[in-house]
Amino acid sequence: MDNKAMKGVIKMTIKTKFDLNEDVYVIKRVKVDTSYKCNICEGKGLIYFKGEKLECPKCEGVGIINSPNNYMYEWQVRSTKIYRVNPEVTKDCQIDRYSVLCSYGYTTDEDYIYKIEEDAIIECQKMNKIEKQNRE
Ligand SMILES: [Zn+2]
């Protein structure tokens, strides 16, 4: 680059907590299907009793047990990499947005990214406890 092109260019170095391609763990709130295969009829919807074929009394012939809403929210840990740093600078000049590489590829706050898996798991358990309290 010649001097003319360099004019007006401000080079800024921003220190980030995470580096590009760094292996990290993110915690994410996901919708979980809570329905499960009926344990009485084993998903068939029918039971045999004294030689007769009857509709399963537990699942009413559906073969699947649904909880009231059929789903709940749960925090899960995902292993991933930092693939982009989004320079979204906060008031106190901190970078707090990162893009993490997941199968679903999404952007998250620094608060949801961990270097150590155990830390992410502990945080997940904490969040799930709150999630459970909110459900009750
Ligand atoms: Zn059943």
Image (tube, helix red, strand yellow):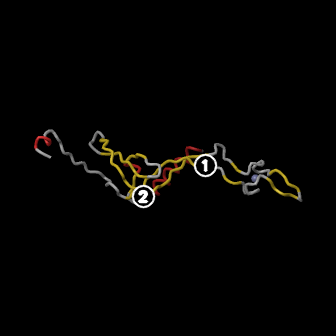
Does the beta carbon at disc 2 come under 8 Å from ligand 1? no
Q: Earlier in the sequence, mark 1 or mark 2?
A: 1
- Toward the right, the furthest residue is 51
Q: Is residue 42 left or right of residue 121?
A: right
Residue lying at 75% horizontally and 49% vertically, measured from the top left: 59
Q: Quadrant of the C terminus?
A: top right
**Position in image of residue 12 (x %, y %):** 20, 45
Q: Closer to the camera, 22 or 27?
A: 22
Nearer the viewer's eye, disc 1 or disc 2? 1
- Per the image, the residue denoted by label 2 is 119
Q: Residues within 10 Å of mark 2 (few under 14, many from 20)?
A: few
**Position in image of residue 100 (x %, y %):** 40, 51
Residue lying at 27% horizontally and 41% vertically, measured from the top left: 92
- Toward the front, the furthest residue is 2
Helix, strand, or loop for circle 2?
A: helix
- Toward the left, the furthest residue is 3
Quarter of the rendering containing residue 116: bottom left
Residue lying at 57% horizontally and 49% vertically, measured from the top left: 32
- Disc 1 vs disc 2: Cβ atoms closer than 8 Å? no
Residue 8 vertical placement versus 45 (above, below): above
**Position in image of residue 128 (x %, y %):** 52, 51
Q: Which amino acid is tagged 2? A: Asp
- Per the image, the residue denoted by label 1 is 33
Q: Closer to the camera, 95 or 53?
A: 53
Q: Residues within 10 Å of mark 1 (few under 14, many from 20)?
A: few
Q: Which amino acid is tagged 1? A: Asp
Alpha-carbon span between mark 1 and mark 2 = 26 Å
**Position in image of residue 103 (x %, y %):** 47, 52
